Image (tube, rainbow, N blue to C red):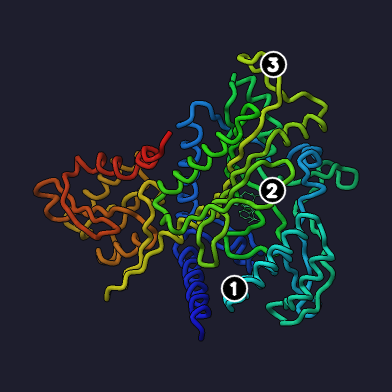
Amino acid sequence: MSTTDAALDHSNHAFKGLIAHAQAYGFIYPSSEIYDGLQSIYDYGPYGVALKRNLQNFWWQSMTQLHENIVGIDAAIMMHPTTWKASGHIDGFTDPMVDNKDSQKRYRVDLLIEEHAMQLVAQGKSTQAKSLMEEMERCLATGNLPGLDELLERFAIVCPLSKTAHWTPVRQFNLMFSTQMGAQNDGTTIYLRPETAQGIFVNFLNVQKTARMKLPFGIAQVGKAFRNEIIARQFIFRMREFEQMEMQFFIQPGTEKKWFDYWQETRKDWYSSLGINQEKINIHPHKQLAHYATAAVDIEYAFPFGSKEVEGIHSRTDFDLKRHEHYAKKKLQYFDPDLKQHYTPYVIETSVGLDRLVLMLLDNALTKTDDPAKRTYLKLPAPLAPIKAAIFPLVKKDGLAERALALFNALKYDFPLIYEETQSIGKRYTRQDLIGTPYCITIDYQTLEDETVTVRERDSMAQYRMKIAETAGYLHAATHIKSLLLQLKT
Ligand code: ATP
């Protein structure tokens, strides 16, 4: 096995281990698993939903609480169908796809070509890989589908399953899910939103007027989005139903460079506060920009399957508001009281996938030690951990269980906790390590004498005694979302 093959094998193994961990310990399950699942749709289990909500709250608070000029909304998933005409999704939200006639498998051409380019790099043929990628990007930017057919042929790109190059012509495939509203046969076709951003644009004037916002100001939203991805894979990285957290920041035209730089820095800062290994974060500026955009970067994380986008930051000019003005025949302008004039604001957008963040956090957190104990634990930041502390009586008898339950009942109003009284303390610690609980608190015989408990830390495994009365303050300081918010520059 070559060094590259060995590295790929190791990454595959690591990713399979991550998926198995997420499923086995109550984070993420395949949807409707008893019916063998539904491709690329997933459900969150007890610890997964808590992790996802904590992450979402952290994002929401960092946007709407730390910035006095950002407010939130919650728009509906179903929107007037003209929204998607105006946004360009009906005509242009497509991916190029191709079918292999032998394996009957469908692929997204750009991903197929990208994978081939990566293989070329691994074989030391970087120049070929570069020219392949450049040619592909030119074809994609100009909608040149026969050009993509030609690239598949010229580079002898084969189906990973059948190993043949027996391809259908490349076709465009619209990614929106449609459904009928009203009577089955004469109802209107509407779409499940493929992004949350349009709910913000169509509410721009409502929010500006009713919340009395002055430019610059932002509107934040968290919600489900749906895309009929041609090949959905890599676990929760590419799903057909997923959650986005988007913020559109409306600004005076001419200030876009300043605000684009500001949001790039602010968002980078947010990732370091999550304790993500910064070597795994990559800022990827777009070379090919959409015709209306003035700048765009992706924030990428080095997943086991490669460095991939988790968030996009885009400078979108007044494109979206102008399109809605045109289709809705309504002015979507702002009256600037300082300049005493009306204009259509420009927009800087930050758009992040919540599920991709969960995957990033789990990957970053899953730790296996090399010591003889071969301990596995999830090193999640304590404020994001699903459970903040587990409360154990050392043994059930001699009144220890009652004391432990009393502590559980006193703390449960402030913290998500687990109470556990069965099995050895060692096994109970292991179980909490696997779901990322940062603290375990044990009531033992000494508690009955001096009102102290043993606190055990997940990462260091250090144990120390603490007065029962101090536990609430201690957990609050260590696990409150505020400790993450305080790390952010505002
Ligand atoms: P990709 O190139 O990976 O398909 P994109 O550029 O189409 O992503 P955007 O339209 O910019 O993605 O959406 C913003 C964010 O939404 C992405 O950065 C990503 O985190 C998330 N996202 C997009 N598509 C999916 C999906 N199918 N599953 C999970 N998250 C997604």
Q: How many marks?
A: 3
Residue closest to the far bottom? 1
Q: What residue type is labelled 3?
A: Gln
Spatial CA span between label 3 and label 2: 30 Å
Q: Are marks 2 and 1 in contact (CB under 8 Å)?
A: no
Q: Which amino acid does label 2 sit on?
A: Leu
Indicate the quadrant where residue 239 lies.
bottom right
Residue to which mark 3 is pinned: 341
Q: Identify the secondary structure beneath mark 1.
A: helix
Dot 3, crowdedness within 10 Å: few (<14), some or many (≥20)?
Answer: few
Residue to which mark 1 is pinned: 121
Q: Identify the secondary structure beneath mark 3.
A: strand
| Closest to the observer, 156 or 84 | 156
Spatial CA span between label 1 and label 3: 54 Å
Indicate the quadrant where residue 305 lies.
bottom right
Direction from residue 62 to residue 161 in the image, left or right: right
Instruction: Give the percent coordinates (x, y) of residue 427.
Output: 29, 67
Instruction: Give the percent coordinates (x, y) of residue 21.
Output: 45, 66
Check mark 3 vs ligand 1: CB closer than 8 Å? yes or no.
no
Spatial CA span between label 2 and label 1: 25 Å
Residue in the picture at 66% in, 63% down = 232
Dot 2 or dot 1: first in sequence order is: 1
Q: What numbered label is drawn on residue 289?
A: 2
Residue closest to the far front? 127
